Amino acid sequence: MEKLTAEYWLIIICSVVILSYFFSIISRYIRVPSVLLLLFGGIFIRWFSNLNNVYYNIPPKMVELLGVVGLIMIVLEAGLDLKLSRDKFKLIRESFFSALIIFVLSAGLITAILNYWLNEKVINCLVYAIPLSIISSSIVIPSIHSLSASKKEFLVYEASFSDIIGILVFNYFTAEEVLTGKSILLFGGSIIFSILLSLVLSVILFIIMAKTKLNIKFFLIFSLLILIYTSGKLLHLPSLIIIIMFGMMINNWELIRFKWIQKLFPIKQIEPIRELLHSITAESSFLIRTFFFILFGYSIQLNFLSEPNILNVGSMVVAALFIVRLLYLRFFVHTNVFPESFFLPRGLITIVLFYKIPDKMKLNAFDDGILFFIILTTSIIMTIGMIFYKKKPEQILEESAFAERNDIR
């Protein structure tokens, strides 16, 4: 396979992109997430290549690189999807606390499961539990097209908040020093500094987008965002805050009350930039997501399904994730639990953070098959929820206990 010519590689790459578009189209009718189809596509390619005694070794750094760029695009896309307004305050508050509390409870339960089954250090088990507790917005957001508008909004906000919370907590617990007054103070200070820095950098990026006369400028912006992210990581700053703040500022530009900013960047000038940036971000996220999940699926070896320890640990983790989500949505958010409780997929961010776990915190007894099992199983659970959500939104009768809800149906 390594002897393939450039023409054959181009055929393969273009075929994968076309296949991904086809998956996106048919997923709307069969209600199976396109990402899950990509995963199974990668698994099938691996099975077919093994059948023909052909295998190409994919460098882990390639998958990690795609994952990091995809993470930046997904966070930016999430920022561009978050619309702030007073009438959405209740929805934003409930989705934030849903993401936060479900994340905390899930991380605690998974830590206990890993500590009990693998007999490893609690802090190391927690570092592994954090990525497994993050809802994958890269799977949720492209998969909610069949839901009502209110359900879509709740899941978009919740998945976006889950990404941000999980990444921030992961960065804290993988730092050199944790659970001390100094580390908490430094971490809180870095968040505040990142928010202030994001305001300055956002203005600079606005100037580049709005004032430059060159037609080619949006991928320059993406390059600068990637540079900001990587530089922030080297300086141990939560740089994803900068990315999402930039996206949120563009999407909520009309809320800025400073007259000199509104004069410098009128909303009429920002609106076409916002629409085009949203479109290009969505296209870029689609492309990166396509190759990431195909390659990740290709790297999965299904022989882990015969390992009892993997099945036991993985099943307990998935059960914990589902029960926590089901109980919280039912008794605290007071919304209809179907199909929201089924939306618990783990995906790109979980995988990327697993690559980022420091060597000193790695669990010797943790098998990668557990990660594969959890990602596949949670995606299949979400698929089941989508398949059985067949009625049109206006045909779905809510329980009387939830009749007073206006923001989430």
Image (cartoon, rainbow, N blue to C red):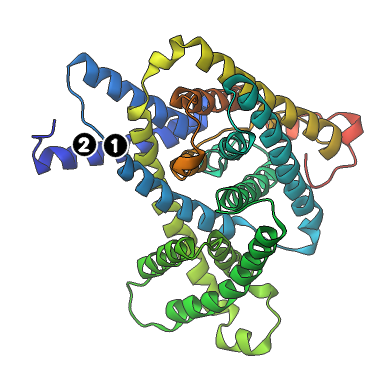
- Identify which amino acid the numbered label 1 is placed on: Val
Left or right of 149 in this view: 11? left
Q: Position of residue 210 (x, y in %)?
A: 46, 80
Residue 258 sits in quarter: bottom right
| Residue named by callout 2 | 12
- Of residues 215 and 74, the one nearer the viewer is 74
| Residue named by callout 1 | 16
Q: Position of residue 141 (x, y in %)?
A: 56, 43
Q: Position of residue 249 (x, y in %)?
A: 60, 69
Residue at 41% in and 29% down: 39
Residue 25 sits in quarter: top left
- Identify which amino acid the numbered label 2 is placed on: Ile
Do residues under tags 2 and 1 come within 8 Å of each other at their CB atoms?
A: yes
Residue at 44% in and 36% down: 24
**Above or below, comparing residue 268 to residue 276 in the picture:** below
- Of residues 403 and 75, the one nearer the viewer is 75
Tell me the crowding category of disc 2: few under 14, some 14 to 19, or many 20 or more residues within 10 angstroms, Cα based: few
Q: Which mark is residue 362?
A: none
Q: What quarter of the picture does the N terminus occupy? A: top left
Residue at 45% in and 67% down: 228
Could you tell me how far apart the alpha carbons at marks 2 and 1 are, in whole angstroms? 6 Å
**Above or below, comparing residue 198 to residue 212 in the picture:** above
Residue 147 sits in quarter: top right
Left or right of 352 in this view: 52? left
- Evaluate whether residue 31 shows in this view: no
Tell me the crowding category of disc 1: few under 14, some 14 to 19, or many 20 or more residues within 10 angstroms, Cα based: some
Mark 2, secondary structure of its residue: helix
Q: Position of residue 196 (x, y in %)?
A: 62, 74
Mark 1, secondary structure of its residue: helix
- Of residues 303 and 141, the one nearer the viewer is 303
